[in-house]
Image: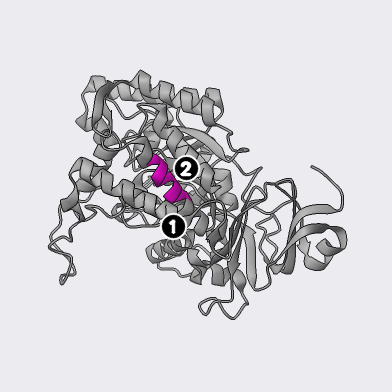
């Protein structure tokens, strides 16, 4: 680290919440930054006595804290959002169609910029993004789609961990570039696409882009519905994808864990400290113990539909010693990337379960989107707290708002009352990307206009205009008769 008395940037005068091991809260604190990393954190007077900088940002009236980390979300969903969300399996059908035959590189580029801008505006400096979804369909037929996504993220300036990998067996699966030139794609092609993206993009953008590998989770329902040969193929493919993640030294993630899936993953050798398991609902005591013993990490999505259909035992997992991050599962069908919302949801979710208003204190919830989330994605040494030597990923939150005043008990107020629109400043790797709530590297209006155009084109390609209509049960009834809901 470069020493000396000259910093590139100093943030001074705010409530600094570094999320360091001491969990200190510094009223009238300051953070000094040089070469994209944190030089020093402390009282403003101490920093001023030691460091000077050509640029100084006055953070009086603001909280200064590490950028938030979203441990589980889906690329592509941003242009689908609420379509057919009241239609049972129809939401999953749209995802499957769009992420195989109904999307183009332009779709992935527009959606990536929109989702990255949403993250930036909400103070999420790092996020995991599965290149598709629900838990099955990844856009892994050709590297052009993943590359378009990554190029869009880099323009906005946030960090992204892009998870790519094969779809679940059986193969081949039909893919097309927006209904043009359909091709049957096998497992080997999808794995090769993932390897190409890994070689081309991992570490790009001064480390802003990381790749992760994914294979769809294998639940009991798959063993019951698939032929024995197809399920054996799926198990072998999961092991091959996992082996590649270990060879490359990258995160391995899976979406949709529930009861029984942890036992199967352990038997297949998929678990470990570089494994991130999403949802993790209805786990047994034995499975909780396995997660803790293997040091596997959990992405808990308290606002997701899966958390309605089953409960993630996040409290029990943490008590057993497991690392659990709060994640958004954003941006659809009914949730945004606002991590304040998901912290608040998590607290109420578990307090209601235990009938105990002291469960999941505000400080722990904040840890679960900062330092604990950094540990969950394997980046604890780089981000997640404001400590000397770490990358300068920093956000400020405006406390001079009616719902956050008066400015005392700052952490309580941030976690219980703030929302993403209170974020004022975002710095990623020492680069100022958002100031006064406005993006500095891109045009917000242009991104939204491009997203609107690509969404309209996608809707026309798949013939989904009817899926934009309000359902008959939208008004007037507290509990409509519904099709079976999917996780």
Residue range (magenta): 108-116
- The reply to whether callout 1 and callout 2 are in contact (CB within 8 Å) is no
**Residue annotated with mark 2:** 152
Q: Which residue is mark 1?
A: 445
Q: CA distance from mark 1 to mark 2?
A: 15 Å
Secondary structure mostly seen in the magenta stretch: helix
**Depth order, front residue of 200/171:** 200
Please give left or right for residue 203 compared with residue 265 in the image.
right
- Residue 456 rendering spot, x and y as whole percentages: 27, 49
Q: Quadrant of residue 129?
A: top left
Task: Name the one closer to the observer, 214 or 61.
Answer: 61
Give residue 95's mark.
none
- Residues packed near mark 2 inside 10 Å, few (<14), some (14 to 19) or many (20 plus): many
Query: Mark 1 packing: few (<14 Cα in 10 Å), some, or many (20+)?
Result: few
Q: Nearer the viewer, residue 70 or 259?
A: 70
Q: Helix or strand or loop: what does disc 1 sit on?
A: helix
Quadrant placement of the N terminus: top right
Position of 248 with respect to 14 (left or right) is left
Q: Nearer the viewer, mark 1 or mark 2?
A: 1
x and y, in percent, of residue 422 in the image: 52, 68
Look at the numbered disc 2 and give the secondary structure of its residue. helix
> Is residue 87 left or right of 185 when viewed as pictured?
left
Q: From this viewpoint, is residue 329 visible?
A: yes
């Amino acid at each position: 680290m470069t020493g000396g008395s000259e910093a590139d940037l100093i943030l001074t005068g705010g409530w600094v919440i570094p999320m360091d091991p001491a969990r200190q809260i510094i009223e009238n604190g300051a953070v000094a930054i040089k070469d994209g990393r944190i030089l020093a954190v402390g009282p403003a007077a101490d920093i001023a006595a030691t460091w000077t900088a050509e640029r100084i940002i006055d953070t009086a009236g603001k909280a200064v804290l590490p950028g938030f980390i979203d441990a589980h979300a889906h690329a592509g969903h941003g242009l689908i959002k609420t379509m057919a969300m009241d239609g049972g399996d129809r939401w999953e059908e749209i995802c499957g169609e769009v992420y195989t035959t109904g999307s183009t590189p332009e779709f992935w580029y527009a959606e990536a910029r929109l989702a990255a801008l949403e993250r930036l505006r909400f103070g999420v400096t790092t996020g995991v993004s599965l290149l598709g979804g629900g838990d099955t369909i990844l856009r892994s037929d050709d590297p052009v789609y993943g590359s378009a996504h990554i190029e869009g993220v880099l323009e906005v300036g946030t960090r992204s961990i892009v998870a790519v990998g094969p779809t679940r067996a059986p193969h081949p699966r039909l893919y097309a570039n927006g209904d043009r030139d359909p091709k049957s794609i096998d497992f080997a092609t999808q794995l090769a696409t993932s390897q190409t993206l890994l070689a081309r993009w991992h570490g790009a953008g001064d480390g802003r882009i990381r790749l992760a590998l994914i294979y769809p989770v294998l639940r009991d329902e798959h063993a019951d519905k698939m032929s024995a040969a197809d399920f054996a193929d799926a198990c072998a493919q999961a092991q091959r994808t996992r082996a590649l993640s270990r060879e490359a030294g990258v995160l391995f993630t899976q979406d949709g864990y529930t009861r029984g899936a942890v036992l199967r993953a352990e038997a297949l050798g998929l678990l470990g400290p570089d494994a991130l398991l999403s949802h993790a609902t209805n786990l047994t005591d034995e499975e909780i113990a396995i997660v803790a013993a293997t040091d596997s990490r959990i992405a808990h999505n308290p606002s997701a539909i899966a958390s309605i259909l089953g409960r993630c035992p996040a409290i029990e997992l943490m008590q057993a010693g497991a690392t659990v991050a709060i994640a958004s599962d954003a941006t659809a069908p009914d949730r945004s990337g606002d991590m304040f919302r998901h912290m608040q949801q998590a607290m109420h979710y578990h307090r209601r379960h235990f009938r105990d208003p002291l469960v999941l204190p505000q400080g722990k919830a904040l840890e679960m989107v900062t330092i604990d989330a950094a540990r969950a994605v394997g980046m604890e040494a780089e981000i997640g707290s404001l400590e000397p030597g770490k990358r300068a990923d920093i956000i400020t939150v405006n406390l001079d708002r009616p719902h956050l005043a008066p400015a005392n008990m700052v952490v309580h107020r941030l976690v219980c009352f703030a929302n993403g629109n209170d974020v004022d400043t975002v710095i990623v790797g020492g680069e100022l990307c958002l100031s006064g709530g406005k993006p500095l590297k891109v045009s917000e209006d242009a991104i939204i206009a491009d997203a609107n155009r690509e969404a309209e084109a996608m809707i026309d390609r798949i013939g989904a205009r009817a899926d934009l209509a309000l359902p008959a049960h939208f008004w007037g009834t507290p509990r409509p008769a519904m099709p079976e809901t999917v996780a």
